[in-house]
Structures are given as C-alpha cells and as structure tokens.
Amino acid sequence: MAGAADGGGHEEFEMKREITVVAEPRETRGKNEARRLRARGLAPAIVYGGGADAVAVSVQPKQLLKILHSRAGQNTIFRLQTNGGDGTPVIIADWQNDPIRGNLLHVDLKRVDMTQRITVKVPVHIHGEPRGVKQQGGLLEIVTREIEIECLPDDIPEQFDLDATALLIGQNIRIADVPLTKSMKLVSAPESVIAHVIALRATVEETESEAAAPAAEPEVIKKGKKEEEGGDEKGKKK
C-alpha cells in the first residue's frame, strides 16, 4: 500500500550542516537576563548532550525560526558556532514560543554525535485519491501524521510520502508499510494505522434503521399498568 520514502542523500545532509548559527555565551541566567536578551532581539538557549556540560548561550531567533519552518524542520542538523570555533552539530530538541506574538522565547539545543544513532519523529504525508473514496463513496481518514524512527543523523528523512490511491473501503496503511532505508529502524508500533478509508453509507443506514424502529414502551409504564389492572380485578372480586 505504501509509496516510496523520501529518504534524502548524504550530499543533501552535508548541505544542511553547512547552516551555521552563531551563539553568544552568557554568564548569567534567570528571568531578568532573559528579558534583557529579548530586548536586544536575542533568545536564550541551552546547549546540552554529547557527554559535555550544559552551556547557556543566546541566539538569533530568526535563524532558528527559519530552520523550524524548513522542510526538515526540527530534524535539521546544523552547526552552532561559539567563540569563533568550527561549530558543533546540534539539533533543536525543544522550544517555547510566545502564545500571542509568536516570538521565540527559549530554545533547547542538543549536541549530535554524527556516528551515533538518534531517535527522531518524521512527518508522514499521504497523497493520491483512494479508490474507496472515488469509486465507493468512502472517506479517507488520517490517523497518524508522524512516526518515530531510530537512525544515524545523516539518514534522517525530511518526510515519508505514502500513496493511498489503491485503498478501498475497509483497507488501511499501517506504520509497518513505511519503507525504511539505510540505517533506519522503526520505533513506533508497526501495527498502528496511519490512514484508512471508512464507509459513510453504513452509518447513514444504521441511523435510518434506528429512526424507523418503534420505540419500546418504558418498563415503568408497563409495571404501572399491570398494578392498575391488578387493582381493578381485586376490586371486582370484592
């Protein structure tokens, strides 16, 4: 059922690591320091992982927002440069936005060892009009929009593209149908459904059948009638 995956090549990921974000070390932390940084157009960040101590830095929020809004998004590996060094490969682990303005308030950056496997969530895109929709009047329902895999950093795909054209009513695409390449291994449950085609007519027929069925007389009323009839009979015997 599944289509080909867009796994990307080594050359493409080498180009991604050409992205360099310059960071400034910061000596102090806390809310006051964060406010001063934001007033200067910067965002506070923490760099951690890779067997080294966590380091507090400040970054240009526009650069990181551009990365987050790219096709690879959160899975983009780029170089973080501090004190004029060569730069360290990092990935955006977490971030916080202002709920009203949308400004980047804080970022967690994780160091990446390019020789070690990492776990990432990859978006799943469904394309094609299923036969069950076009020919049978069903509805395509998307259940899962991303799956979790483990792989080497160079093998992280931007997304998985799956073709739903062949699906009929009652058929589905499961996570096990996603084609994995290179060093990729599945972390998500393989039997979980990504998308399926459901029938709308069955629901309509059931609703119409329920509406046409005669309503059952409440038990309380029946009981009341029996008691009333029993009372009348007793009265007649007397």
Image (cartoon, grey):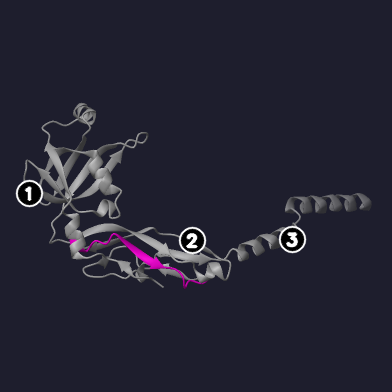
What residue appears at the point 49 percent right and 66 percent down from the top-left corner? Answer: 129
Tell me the mark number nearer the camera, choosing from 2 and 1. Answer: 1
- Asked if the magenta segment contains residue 73, the reply would be no
Q: Position of residue 150 (x, y in %)?
A: 24, 62
For the record, the magenta segment spans 153-169
Question: Would residue 224 be found to the left or right of residue 194 on screen?
Answer: right
What residue appears at the point 85 percent right and 53 percent down from the top-left corner? Answer: 230
What residue appears at the point 29 percent right and 63 percent down from the top-left corner? Answer: 187
Q: Where is residue 223 in the image (x, y as percent from the top left)?
A: 77, 52
Helix, strand or loop under label 2:
strand
Q: Which mark is on residue 141?
A: 2
Q: Quadrant of the N terminus?
A: bottom left
**Image quadrant in which you'd find residue 189:** bottom left
Q: Where is residue 195 in the image (x, y as percent from the top left)?
A: 44, 64
Helix, strand or loop under label 1:
loop
**Badge 1: few (under 14), some or many (20 or more) residues near its Cα, within 10 Å?**
few
- In contact (CB < 8 Å): disc 1 and disc 3: no
Residue type, numbered disc 1: Asp
Residue type, numbered disc 2: Glu
For disc 3, the marked residue is: 212
What residue appears at the point 82 percent right and 52 percent down from the top-left corner? Answer: 225
Helix, strand or loop under label 3:
helix
